[in-house]
Image (cartoon, rainbow, N blue to C red):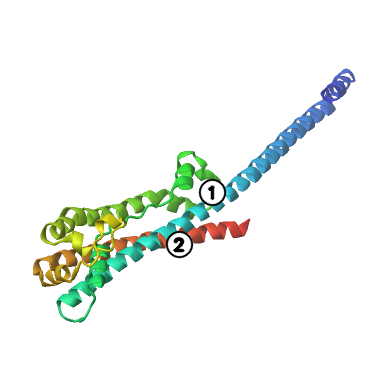
């Protein structure tokens, strides 16, 4: 094809048709430019098609990831709510607002207060998207921003959870262990039978805790820490829902 066009130009020059030669040369340049533009457009179209296919896959993986994270954070919020309710019940018993509560119920509430729930999100796909440079594949700027800010939001929640954990481990656990018979208190709740004792009455231990006024501050502090932590967890939860909504909106476009 190139030889054919070259031959035409040579014939025009030999025939002395310079004007036609220039017009033909310009036309040939225009055709070459148009061909290049078409090739670039086809290449862009192919690249865009590939990226949209990759985006679809990433969006589906992100959806699964944040659905798991939503379940995870709901579980941890529920655990802290259970701690709050357990603390309120014990304080109500101590204030004689509730009567005739079985010793096992109080012991179970105290065992609930001995938990230290932490949010452990799944971050595999998010980390890969952010660290591998695949973020550009996503077309939603709002989703890009939320994924970029995700780790900072989780870190803030982790700080609150760590404060609660540190208080429990460094203050509440030592107090109740040093001042009360924990082994008898939690009799029947141990995973191993060797630590459980039949015919052991834990009511005296429970009564001692009910009569212990110094322990009230620990209950109140744990309750306050749980409330504050759940407030922060609720913010993270709303962000998870926003991410899922953005993902669904993008998937609906495909």
Q: Is residue 188 visible?
A: yes
Residue closer to the observer: 117 or 67: 117
Residue occupied by mark 2: 241
- The structure residue drawn at horizontal position 20% and vertical position 72%, both measured from the top left corner, is 90
Quick check: 237 left or right of 211? right
Tell me the SS state at disc 2: helix
Quick check: 152 left or right of 64? left
x and y percentages locating residue 52 in the rendered image:
61, 48
Residue occupied by mark 1: 138
Residue 200 occupies quadrant = bottom left
- The structure residue drawn at horizontal position 10% and vertical position 69%, both measured from the top left corner, is 212
Residue closer to the observer: 72 or 97: 97
Direction front: furthest residue: 199
Instruction: Please say if 132 is above or below 223.
Output: above
Residue closer to the observer: 124 or 110: 110
x and y percentages locating residue 138 in the rendered image:
54, 49
Instruction: Please say if 58 is above or below 176.
Output: above
**CA–CA distance between discs 2 and 1?**
18 Å
Direction top: furthest residue: 14
Instruction: Please say if 230 is above or below 159.
Output: below
Instruction: Please say if 243 is above or below 205.
Output: above
Tell me the SS state at disc 1: loop
- The structure residue drawn at horizontal position 37% and vertical position 52%, both measured from the top left corner, is 120
- The structure residue drawn at horizontal position 30% and vertical position 57%, both measured from the top left corner, is 193
- Give the numbered dot on residue 104: none
Quick check: 148 left or right of 212? right
Assign the C terminus to one quadrant of the image.
Answer: bottom right
Give whichever of discs 2 and 1 has the lower sequence position.
Answer: 1
Assign the N terminus to one quadrant of the image.
Answer: top right
x and y percentages locating residue 181 in the rendered image:
15, 61
Label 2 or label 1, whichever lies nearer to me, is: 2
Q: Is residue 139 visible?
A: no
């Amino acid at each position: 094809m190139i030889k054919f066009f070259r031959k035409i130009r040579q014939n025009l020059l030999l025939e002395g048709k310079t004007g036609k030669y220039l017009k033909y040369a310009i036309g040939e340049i225009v055709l070459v430019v148009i061909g290049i533009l078409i090739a670039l457009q086809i290449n862009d179209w192919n690249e865009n098609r590939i990226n949209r296919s990759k985006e679809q896959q990433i969006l589906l993986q992100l959806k699964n990831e944040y659905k798991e994270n939503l379940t995870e954070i709901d579980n941890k919020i529920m655990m802290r709510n259970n701690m709050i309710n357990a603390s309120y019940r014990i304080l109500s018993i101590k204030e004689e607002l509730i009567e005739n509560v079985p010793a096992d119920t109080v012991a179970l509430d105290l065992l609930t207060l001995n938990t230290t729930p932490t949010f452990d999100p799944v971050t595999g796909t998010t980390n890969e998207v952010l660290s591998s440079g695949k973020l550009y594949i996503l077309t939603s700027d709002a989703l890009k921003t939320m994924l970029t800010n995700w780790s900072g939001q989780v870190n803030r929640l982790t700080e609150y959870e760590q404060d609660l954990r540190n208080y429990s481990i460094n203050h509440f656990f030592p107090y109740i262990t040093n001042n009360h018979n924990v082994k008898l208190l939690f009799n029947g709740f141990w995973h191993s039978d060797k630590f459980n004792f039949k015919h052991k009455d834990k009511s005296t231990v429970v009564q001692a805790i009910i009569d212990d006024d110094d322990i009230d501050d620990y209950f109140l502090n744990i309750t306050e820490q749980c409330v504050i932590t759940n407030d922060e967890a609720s913010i993270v939860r709303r962000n998870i829902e926003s991410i899922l909504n953005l993902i669904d909106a993008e998937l609906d476009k495909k």
